[in-house]
Image: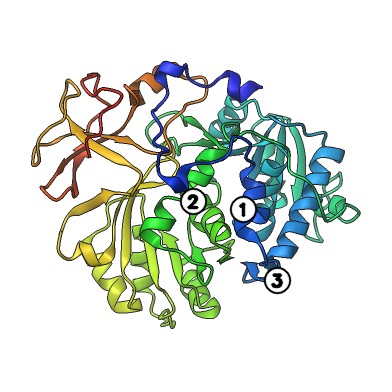
Amino acid sequence: MFVRDNLPPALLQPDLLLGMPHLRFPARLNCAWELLDGAGSLDRSKRLAVLSPHGVRWTYGQLTAEVSRIVHVLTEDLDLVPGNRVLLRGANTPMLAAIWLAVVRAGGVVVAAPMSLRGQALAHVIDKARVTHVLCESALRSELAATGRAPRTMYFLDDEADTGTGTTLEQAMVTKPDWSLPVDTTATDPCLIAFTSGTTGTPRATIHSHRDVMAACNSFPLHVLRATGDDRFIGSASLTSTYGLGGLLLFPLHVGATTVLLDDPTPRQLARSISKFKATVCFGAPDIYRAVCAERTTYDMSSLRECVSTGEPLPTETRRRWKRRTGSGLIDGLSSTEMFHIFVAMRGEEAWTRPGAMGRPVPGYLTAIVDESGRPLPHGEVGALAVKGPTGCRYLDDDERQQDYVRNGWNFTGDACWTDEYGFLYYHSRTGGPLSGSGLPRDSHAG
């Protein structure tokens, strides 16, 4: 299997902390099946799973049926076999969500790249992951053609004016059965290659397994967001990012909640949809929250219970304006593609008593601030941020970058921080690269 064969060597892989009961998973695990049909999914087939402004109202039963039809198209029409890499390109739509679940259910590996990547950057993604199949929204046909690459491709969301050749995904699904069995994957089998944005150089390919997905579902949303099946998730983050994937698909499905997917999440569309669908949880970045607050049209967003922000530091003024506008607080999170999702978080009520703090480690994660030699520093001293938890960095076929990011089992995020005596982290600057020291032992439990 290409992806497994190109994992980092064992000595360069991060230590995973899986001792907590909710982070222990069986050896055989298919996360797409677990999210839709697992033990925690009983008796919810009639509950709403996915909504969109264009009238889609899929229950869990309907979503499962759509996923199964796509599985049959993948395996019967496109000859997909376990381990194949499938690039997904499209806006946040119910169909894209169903495709993600179908690829993983069929044992494939989703290749997720930011929608901002085009041209040679997108070609790099296809080459690096050795993409075998592409499922692409019809509107992005020319963008894909511009890469000069020709993996096996099927388009979806074709409109009536589309005169492209070949059968679309929707057409192929019509005659397929609405049931399917998942491929019997192991918990450690790769299911996702997620690429970084490339803002600091060539996009990096990070590998995540079925276990990683479920570990993320049992970390931030359980302990910090405190999500339940009564929540309605919404947001501006893209499903092609690990942040958006978790917040707008994996986390809501895991708890049996509803997700509202917006294909054009402008500030006005987001505010209007929060009001229309009575959303309770929102995932975005500081800029979208600032923009919504600046909107002149006033929408009722009082249904919001919790909102999450990551991607850049969250200014206190943005937090204050959002609270005045919606009545909801903002959870500030530190996340990375390498770590899959948020591993340090600051809840809204804590932020007012700890101005400037980034937060504390999400339960299940450990952090340490270390010097140039990798030795832990006392409270108040600035050093490099090192992290361990149930997820960690594994670059695809890139040992040089891997040994920069992972040292003695710890993930070095490239952030320089300090902590106070209560364990709250404060951001100082970027380190310019992870430290080269190895003072932290592999069994260290600095927090």
Q: Quadrant of residue 62?
A: bottom right
Q: Quadrant of residue 160?
A: bottom right
Identify the residue under disc 2: 217
Left or right of residue 107: residue 304? left
Q: Residues within 10 Å of mark 2 (few under 14, many from 20)?
A: many
Q: Check disc 1 and give the amino acid type.
A: Leu
Image side of residue 378 versus residue 127, left or right: left
SS class of the residue under badge 3?
loop
Q: Residue at x 41, y 63 (%)?
A: 226
Q: First in sequence, mark 2 or 3: give its number.
A: 3
- For residue 46, the mark is 3
Residue ID for mark 1: 35
Q: Earlier in the sequence, mark 2 or mark 1?
A: 1
- Residue at the outermost right position: 175
Q: Amino acid at mark 2?
A: Cys
Q: Are marks 2 and 1 in contact (CB under 8 Å)?
A: yes
State how far apart marks 2 and 1 are (Cα): 10 Å
Query: Residue 17: x percent and y percent?
Result: 39, 36
